[in-house]
Image: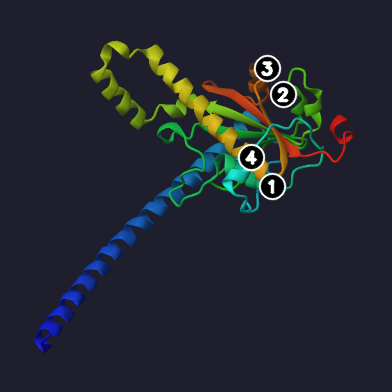
Amino acid sequence: MSKKSLQDLRREVSGFTDEIRRELKEHVSEIRENLDRQVTRLRAEVEDVKEELERRFGTDDSHVVFRALPKPRRLNMPLTEVLERRQTRRTFSDEPLSDLDMATILWAADGINRSSGRRTTPTALDWRETDIYLLKSNGIWRWVPEKNGLLFCELADLRSETFFAAPHLKVAPVHIVYVSNRPRTETLISRLGEGVVEKLRHSAWTPEKLEEMRTRSMIIDVGAKIQAVYMAAAAMDLSCVARTGFDAHHVERILRLQKGESVVAIQTLGYRPNSILDAIK
């Protein structure tokens, strides 16, 4: 290869490198702007949740509002083994779940696993319409995935009010309540999609069909979270049972839910008992 051709090649490489650098700078700037917008939006959402809960429950101790949880621990059990271990267990120790274990379970159910803010479990059209409440001996709490922590709602132990005839569940330290928020399903993307379907299949598209689709989607979204918790519980050797045997209207009242919010399921969680005596306290 001649000296001139080498120089030409170097100039081409240099020009190509400069072009890549310019593009990277543009993308970095765009990414930073997007992240700034996301951070601003997430902060606003958290503040909105705080204000909503304060209006709904009130507070006698307003400085104790948010409880940060530790970073969830990594679960290294192979997927096949997790699926082999997954099972429903209805006996519990009354030992409180540690913050680390609670953070790991909640991250599995509805945690943030990407810089875009997307979640560990799917939701139809990214609605993110499911809210998670915890009923514990020290009150009602609401999970805030954007902050990896819990917002305090009310100092009341309401665990025993979430089942009909299952007294053995009384000792379990945590009941996870899955609440669907229907207004969040009415997004711009949803409306655009519905408009397209209505034009293509007008005769088959009715308000009743639309409501049925939304209901199915919300139930499936909760089901995905329940299975994620089951799998995490299997990897952590915890007792876990999902259930629908409760008075939904009563649970909605004690959570002071608003119009458009409904309880879909409850999942009871805790450590396995050391002996039969632990499970009958």
Q: Position of residue 26 (x, y in %)?
A: 28, 61
Q: Sequence-wise, which precedes: disc 4 or disc 3?
A: 4
- Residue that carries the numbered disc 1 in the rendered image: 101
The relative height of residue 204 versus residue 256 in the rendered view (above or below) is above
Q: Is residue 206 left or right of residue 91?
A: left
Residue located farthest toward the bottom when viewing the structure as drawn: 3
Tag 4 near tag 2, CB within 8 Å: no
Q: Position of residue 51 (x, y in %)?
A: 57, 37
Tag 4 near tag 1, CB within 8 Å: no
Q: Nearer the viewer, residue 42 or 161?
A: 161
Q: Sequence-wise, which precedes: disc 1 or disc 3?
A: 1
Q: Give the structural element (helix, strand or loop) at label 3.
A: loop
The type of residue carrying mark 2 is Thr
Which corner quadrant of the image does residue 175 belong to? top right
Which corner quadrant of the image does residue 50 belong to? top right
The type of residue carrying mark 1 is Asp
| Residue 200 in sight from this viewpoint | yes
Closer to the eye: label 1 or 3: 1
| Residue at the image point whose x is 18% and y is 80% from the top | 10
Q: CA distance from mark 1 to mark 3?
A: 28 Å
Numbered tag placed on residue 247 in the rendering = 3
Tag 2 near tag 1, CB within 8 Å: no
Q: Nearer the viewer, residue 138 or 17?
A: 17
Residue density around tag 1, few if under 14, some if 14–19, many if 20 or more, within 10 Å:
many
Numbered tag placed on residue 217 in the rendering = none
